[in-house]
Image (cartoon, helix red, strand yellow):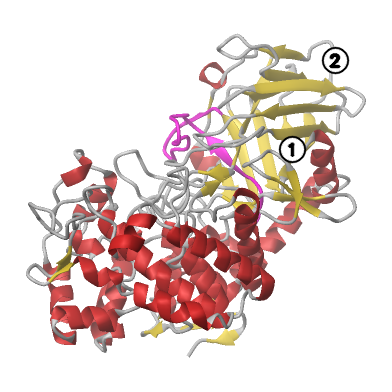
């Protein structure tokens, strides 16, 4: 069976700053490749593709994992004819989105202004492009500035344009540059080719390559290392191959990835939603390493700007993805998982801290060190071990006990947590989530230590994993912020977002104890009382107060837009909540809510997600929930099993009972 035709790569793109239906991009990209390509319809910071727009500013080489993180190392390709402009605000063209072809392996866009067809198929570190210009006009291929500084030069001997950009978004890096080479199969017209200026007046910030032919093919390749390595990447990816050859390779890679899970569904809508989500799970994290001509894997290190041996991965927020994306990869992509984890641990070796939210450099966007769960899950499932796991444990112990010199790294409030058994409200925001995540992280450390035979650490960190109990208030039945002197913070309203909580209120945050629901039951006075509290959560009105945020954030709006009570399936802290019922023996309630959430909150359409998709996290939740299998606690080699929402399913060819 073929699957690629079922994928809508625009799923989740119909989003705005204030309301997210995914906040995704229609990425033409190979699985976990170094870069992707997207139409740019209207540039508005992190938002640059809108599915209903009829304007087209160009095709963008992008690494953007989220509009909130934004992009880096980006280039914009815009075909123009005769009269040429130096920036996309003037060079944009009309196009017909209903006629555009956009698949994971191929895109075709028609720029109406220049009457040019732009086709692209992706490679690991670049792409193959085919341009068809009209007769009777001077064809140009323009590289226009988007973010940061740009420099271009034309290599007439190679018949190529070379360039670089240092553009990035709030990332602390050393000497970062993304190098690009675009090599053409038709001679460049030297007399008509010229450089343009950026809006700040800097020269050679854009370039317009002219041709005498109406059909031009181009090989595109990038490197974080050098022009020489970019050319080597091109040789490995696409040089000497036809456009159709590269497209067939891309198609085969996607068909293989999508076919790792085979389902028989009741309707086409479910098939399309499932495989559109499957595509989303294969995009992030991005490879950030390259392979030399001698076959050695090497990478640019953002913390010191040097080139080191080994693999590296980037563009991933573990606060989101540990809950579902990596548990899914543990089922369908163990080799990829192992290599990704090796790449993440490289950041500790080279920079002294395990990553939290790497996007070329460390962004520190979300709190806590949830890579702990990704490491622990890989350890207990036999995906990694040995010296690499020893190094990972060393990094975990480091951020569990020491304050980082920069707030983007490590556990916030680590030393206070060690001293008090919780992160105090009078010194830190998000303190409830920081405490609960630290307790869960300590559990993960204990699991890694157990795998490695470090019995001296197991008891200590299992004891620390119960620190969540220090914030439980039996009078209200919620986890609450506590000051350094041991008093709960006042006033308290369980509908207040922010302040003590991360992207939620006490309702969404108080059940974040995946490693010890039995202990949570004891705090509530028994299993029945915890189940009663969950019933209250689902039956409550989807009300909220702006609380510590002082403004409305889109996650509040999205929760209130649907009728799932205080279960904000639009955001990751609620992902596990429906599954707590099944863990406590109330499987029917889990099945009821999971079925409703999957059927009412998800589709394959452009508005197909209930909130931010976040690097495969929300798509993976849908995949696992549809299959009736959920890892409620990464770090334990066990799964919640409920009734499947499809007729049948196979994972890697094996029937799922």
Horizontal side of 274 relative to 340 (left or right) equals: left
* Vertical arrangement, residue 562 with respect to residue 116, above or below: below
Residue topped by disc 1 = 130
In the image, residue 113 lies at what x, y percent? 58, 22
- Residue pushed farthest right? 157
Where residue 410 is drawn, which disc sits there?
Answer: none
Asked if residue 45 lies in the magenta stretch, the reply is yes
Tell me what residue is drawn at x 60 percent, y 14 percent: 198
Which is nearer the eye, 8 or 573? Answer: 573
Residue 149, percent across and down? Answer: 62, 22
- List the residue tagged with mark 2: 190
Residue at 57% across, 36% down:
72
Q: Count the labels in the image.
A: 2
- Label 2 neighbour load within 10 Å: few <14, some 14-19, many 20+: few
Q: In the rendered image, which quarter is residue 51 located in?
A: top left
518 vs 186: above or below? below
Mark 2–mark 1 Cα distance, whole angstroms, equals 20 Å
Residue at x 50% of width, y 80% of height: 456
Q: Residue at x 60, y 58 (%)?
A: 344
Question: How far across and how far down the image is residue 249, in percent?
Answer: 75, 58
> Which is the main secondary structure of the residues drawn in magenta?
loop
Please name whichever residue, 130 or 405, is drawn nearer the observer in this view of the structure: 405
Q: Is residue 309 magenta?
A: no
Question: Of marks 2 and 1, which one's residue comes earlier in the chain?
Answer: 1
Find the magenta span and give its range: 30-57
In the picture, residue 525 is in which quadrant?
bottom left
Sort mark 1 into few (<14), some (14-19) or many (20+) by Cα contacts within 10 Å. Answer: many
Q: Nearer the viewer, residue 635 or 495?
A: 635
Location of the N terminus by quadrant is bottom right
Q: Nearer the viewer, mark 2 or mark 1?
A: 2
Answer left or right for 192 relative to 592: right
Observer able to see residue 246: yes
């Amino acid at each position: 069976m073929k699957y690629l035709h079922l994928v809508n790569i625009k799923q989740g793109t119909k989003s705005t700053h204030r309301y997210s239906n995914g906040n995704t991009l229609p990425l033409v990209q190979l699985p976990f490749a170094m870069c992707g390509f997207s139409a740019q319809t209207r540039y508005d910071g992190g938002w640059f593709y809108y599915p209903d727009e009829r304007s087209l500013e160009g095709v963008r080489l992008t690494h953007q994992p989220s509009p909130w993180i934004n992009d880096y190392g980006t280039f914009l390709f815009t075909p123009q004819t005769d009269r040429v402009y130096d920036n996309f605000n003037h060079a944009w063209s009309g196009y017909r989105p209903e006629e555009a072809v956009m698949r994971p392996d191929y895109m075709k866009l028609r720029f109406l202004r220049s009457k040019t067809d732009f086709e692209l198929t992706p490679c690991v570190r670049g792409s193959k492009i085919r341009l068809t210009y009209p007769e009777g006009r001077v064809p140009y291929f323009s590289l226009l500035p988007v973010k940061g500084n740009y420099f271009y030069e034309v290599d007439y001997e190679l018949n190529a344009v070379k360039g670089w950009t240092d553009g990035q978004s709030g990332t602390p890096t050393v000497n970062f540059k993304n190098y690009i080479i675009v090599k053409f199969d038709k001679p460049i017209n030297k007399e008509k080719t010229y450089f343009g200026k950026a809006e700040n007046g800097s020269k050679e910030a854009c370039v317009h390559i002219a041709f005498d032919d109406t059909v031009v093919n181009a090989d595109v390749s990038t490197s974080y290392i050098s022009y020489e390595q970019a050319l080597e990447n091109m040789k490995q990816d696409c040089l000497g191959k036809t456009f159709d050859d590269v497209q067939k390779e891309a198609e085969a890679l996607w068909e293989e990835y999508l076919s790792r899970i085979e389902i028989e569904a009741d309707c086409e809508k479910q098939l399309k939603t499932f495989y559109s989500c499957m595509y989303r799970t294969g995009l992030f994290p991005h490879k950030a390493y390259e392979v030399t001509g001698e076959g050695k894997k090497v990478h640019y290190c953002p913390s010191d700007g040097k080139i080191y041996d080994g693999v590296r991965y980037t563009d991933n927020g573990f606060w989101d993805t540990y809950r579902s994306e990596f548990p899914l990869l543990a089922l369908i992509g163990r080799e990829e998982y192992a290599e990704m984890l090796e790449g993440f641990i490289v950041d500790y070796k080279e920079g002294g801290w395990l990553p939290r939210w790497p996007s070329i450099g460390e962004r520190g966007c979300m709190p806590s060190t949830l890579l702990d769960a990704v490491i622990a899950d890989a350890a207990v499932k036999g995906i990694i071990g040995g010296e690499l796991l020893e190094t990972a444990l060393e990094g975990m112990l480091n951020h569990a006990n020491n304050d980082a010199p920069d707030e983007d790294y490590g556990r916030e409030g680590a030393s206070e947590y060690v001293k008090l058994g919780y992160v105090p409200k009078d010194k830190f925001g998000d303190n409830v989530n920081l405490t609960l995540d630290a307790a869960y992280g300590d559990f993960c450390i204990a699991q890694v230590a157990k795998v490695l035979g470090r019995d001296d650490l197991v008891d200590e960190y299992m004891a620390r994993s119960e620190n969540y109990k220090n914030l439980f208030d039996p009078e209200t039945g919620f986890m609450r912020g506590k000051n350094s002197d041991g008093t709960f913070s006042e006033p308290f309203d369980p509908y207040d977002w922010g302040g003590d909580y991360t992207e939620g209120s006490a309702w969404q945050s108080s059940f974040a104890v995946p490693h010890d629901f039995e202990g949570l039951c004891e705090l509530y006075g028994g299993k029945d009382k915890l189940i009663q509290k969950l019933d209250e959560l689902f039956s409550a009105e989807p009300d909220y107060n702006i609380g510590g945020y002082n403004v409305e954030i889109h996650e509040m709006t999205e929760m209130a837009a649907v009728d799932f009570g205080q279960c904000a399936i639009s955001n990751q802290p609620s992902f596990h909540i429906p599954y707590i019922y099944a863990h406590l023996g109330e499987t029917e309630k889990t099945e009821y809510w999971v079925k409703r959430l999957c059927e009412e909150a998800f589709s394959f359409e452009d508005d197909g997600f209930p909130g931010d998709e976040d690097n495969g996290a929300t798509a993976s939740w849908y995949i696992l929930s549809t299959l009736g299998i959920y890892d409620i606690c990464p770090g334990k080699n066990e799964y919640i099993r409920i009734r499947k929402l499809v007729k049948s399913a196979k994972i890697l060819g094996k029937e799922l009972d």
